[in-house]
Every structure is written in structure tokens, then in C-alpha cells.
């Protein structure tokens, strides 16, 4: 995946945490979806104009400009949200009065559920290299059920897929 939602040099990307990089990838995927939808909409307009024998009309160009402007506004919203979330994560990822954020000792409830999923998955991947022991430990983790919400089952299934 080419990442062009925000401009960062290689050093800046290297300094992103796993959670921040997941945010960047999520925003990039959203941008790609927006641009693909805009391209599809322009294609449908072209087909409609061709069927009416007015494809050389300036109306097609005007519609394309309008679609591009709408898509760019949506991408700007995604970009601004990403920058805010990265800054927020950077400022509040350090910890609280209980110490630095680390799952399960001090989970970060400021994270969204997709980011929590990544943090817990990374924790269990580091705990042991034995897939069966990893799955058993995760299955006994009562905090993970509440911390991950609906993502608990997804992570359980992912860890179970490593057992085979």
C-alpha cells in the first residue's frame, strides 16, 4: 500500500508507534475508498453521457470537477482527523498516574477498539512463541473480554488459527 495521506519522511514514519502506524494505514485505506468511489462515479457519468450522445459536452467536465472537489473535501477531513489522532496518541500514550500504558498492567482506554485490538495482539504475540499456550492464556484473560469488546472474538479466532 502506498501511503500518501500525509507527508512524512522515512525517519518520521520510523518514529511512529504501532498504533499510530495502524491509524495511518486505516486513514490511507479510507482515502483509497473515497478516490475509488469518485472514479466510479465519474465513469458512470461518462457512460450516461455517452448513451445520450453528449459526452463531448462541457457538462461532463463540470461534473468531474465537482466530484473531484467533493472527494478532496472528504480526504481532507480524513487527513485532519488522522493528524489529530496521531497528535492525541503521542500526547496521551505515555501513561497516567498508574505508570506507562502497557497491556494488561495499565491498559489505555483512550484508544479506539481497533487500536486496542492491535495492542493486545502485539502483547500476546510477544508473551510466548507457542501458539497453543498463547491461545490458552488469551482465553483465560478476563480483562481482554471487556477491553476489546466485539474484537475479542476476532482476536481469539486469529490466535486459534495459529494453533493448527
Image (cartoon, rainbow, N blue to C red):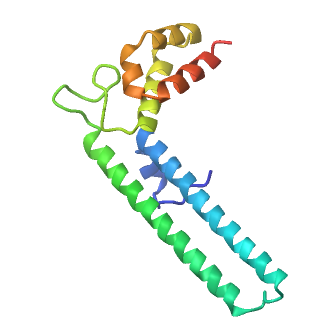
Q: Position of residue 63 (x, y in %)?
A: 63, 82
Residue 162 appears left or right of 88: right
Q: Residue at x 60, y 82 (%)?
A: 65
Q: How many marks?
A: 0
Question: Who is closer to the viewer here, 86 or 35?
Answer: 35
Q: Position of residue 164 (x, y in %)?
A: 68, 12
Q: Position of residue 162 (x, y in %)?
A: 63, 17
Q: Residue at x 30, y 33 (%)?
A: 109
Question: Who is closer to the viewer here, 75 or 127?
Answer: 75
Above-or-below relation of 32 to 103: below
Q: Residue at x 72, y 76 (%)?
A: 45
Q: Quadrant of residue 42?
A: bottom right
Residue 140 appears left or right of 132: left
Residue 118 appears left or right of 99: right
Question: Who is closer to the viewer here, 121 or 90?
Answer: 121
Above-or-below relation of 112 to 10: above
Q: Quadrant of residue 103?
A: top left
Which residue is farthest front? 52
Residue 148 appears left or right of 105: right
Q: Position of residue 78 (x, y in %)?
A: 45, 59
Above-or-below relation of 143 to 7: above
Amino acid at each position: 500500500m502506498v501511503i500518501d495521506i500525509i507527508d512524512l519522511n522515512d525517519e518520521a514514519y520510523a518514529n511512529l508507534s504501532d498504533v499510530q502506524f495502524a491509524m495511518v494505514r486505516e486513514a490511507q485505506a479510507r482515502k483509497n475508498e473515497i478516490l475509488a468511489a469518485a472514479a466510479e462515479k465519474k465513469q458512470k457519468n461518462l457512460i450516461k453521457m455517452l448513451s445520450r450522445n453528449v459526452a463531448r459536452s462541457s457538462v461532463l467536465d463540470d461534473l468531474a470537477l465537482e466530484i473531484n472537489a467533493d472527494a478532496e473535501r472528504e480526504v481532507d477531513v480524513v487527513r485532519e482527523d488522522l493528524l489529530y489522532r496521531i497528535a492525541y496518541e503521542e500526547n496521551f500514550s505515555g501513561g497516567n498516574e498508574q505508570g506507562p500504558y502497557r497491556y494488561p498492567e495499565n491498559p489505555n482506554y483512550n484508544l479506539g477498539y481497533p487500536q486496542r485490538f492491535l495492542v493486545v495482539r502485539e502483547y500476546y504475540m510477544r508473551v510466548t512463541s507457542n501458539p497453543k499456550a498463547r491461545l490458552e492464556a488469551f482465553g483465560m484473560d478476563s480483562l481482554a473480554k471487556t477491553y476489546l469488546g466485539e474484537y475479542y472474538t476476532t482476536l481469539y479466532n486469529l490466535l486459534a488459527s495459529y494453533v493448527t
